[in-house]
Amino acid sequence: MNTVNQIFDWSRFTATLRKEVVENWRPIVFTLLGVYGLLTMIMILGNAISFDDAVSDAMSEGMVPQKVVYGILGFSVMIVASMAFRKLTSKTGRIDMMTSPSSTLEKFLVNGVVYVLGFFVSFLILAQLADLTRIAVMHIFGFQGFIPGVINFTNLGADFTYGLGSELFKGSLAVPYAWCSLLATSGIYLLGSVMWPRLSLLKTFAAIYAVEFVLGVLAVIFIFVFSDMESFGYWVFMHVDGILPFLMTLMAIQAILGWGLAWYLFKHKDVISLKWWK
């Protein structure tokens, strides 16, 4: 392997990637099997209770399953990303990670590829497999109700509405926004995994909602000081076309900051201390 370039070398990166997958294939496989089982169970139960015409129509168009699957993906991303740097929780793990011949950038990218990007791709494949399993199980057991055909889960986020206007989260930017928000979320939880390797999920979750609570209170105060809720709601309705690009910009900034700060703090980690400010 090339030892001259200490920043990034493709052969070192692929070797580190193989090492990570080979050493952790059991927990990776068990996690994916758990996700597949959960998706299959939810899809079968969802199909079994979709006897109402309105629900059946939504099922046939993929709207209800897509929203449910996207919600599961969002929670799964938080859990998996928060476990990306679990080796930092023990001195043995830190020694193994820090003393390997790959650079810190390569180590960081490997964890991002395996536990975020790789999980995204695996999740979509598992969702499609779970959907095919649903169809097979419903036919095998002679289900007499409505069985929608194969649902496309590659366009997750294509038909979401969040109450800010019926057309806000529809159109060409809906899918990019959905995936951009997932990248932003994964970046924050990667950052939490580096900052607080122990109980990372709970600590990051608490920190996020503490910040959101403070920002929410400040936003409400700002609205009541300079306007009122009715006027603000009317303004949102009149400017709905420009809100989604603005939110996408915020998500992109959050993703860049999350991933960038996670890399910066990981680069300054050492074997002895777990304190994130060192």
Image (tube, rainbow, N blue to C red):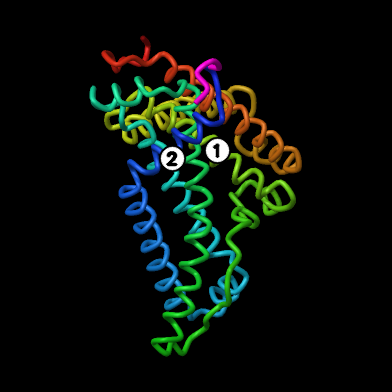
Which residue is the site of mark 1? 183
Q: Amino acid at mark 2?
A: Arg
Look at 71% across and 37% down and name the residue there: 245
Q: CA distance from mark 1 to mark 2?
A: 23 Å
Which residue is the site of mark 2? 18
Q: Quadrant of residue 104?
A: top left
Q: Nearer the viewer, residue 123 or 204?
A: 123
Characterize the local packing of mark 1: few (<14), some (14-19) or many (20 or more) Cα atoms within 10 angstroms: many
Q: Nearer the viewer, residue 202 or 256?
A: 256
Give the vertical position of 49 relative to 260 (above or below): below
Tell me which label, 1 or 2, sits earlier in the chain. Answer: 2
Characterize the local packing of mark 2: few (<14), some (14-19) or many (20 or more) Cα atoms within 10 angstroms: few
Q: Is-magenta flag for residue 134?
A: no
Give the vertical position of 229 relative to 73 (above or below): above
Give the vertical position of 175 relative to 214 (above or below): below
Q: Which contiguous range is marked in magenta?
A: 1-5
Residue furthest out toward the top: 278
Report the mark closest to the observer, 1 or 2: 2
Q: Amino acid at mark 1?
A: Leu
Residue 146 coordinates in the image, percent (x, y) = 52, 83
Residue 229 coordinates in the image, percent (x, y) = 60, 36
Look at 47% across and 51% down and name the residue there: 73
Position of 209 with respect to 233 (left or right) is: left
Please tell me the numbered disc located at residue 98: none
Give the vertical position of 83 relative to 30 (above or below): above
Look at 63% across and 46% down and name the residue there: 164
Residue 161 coordinates in the image, percent (x, y) = 61, 53
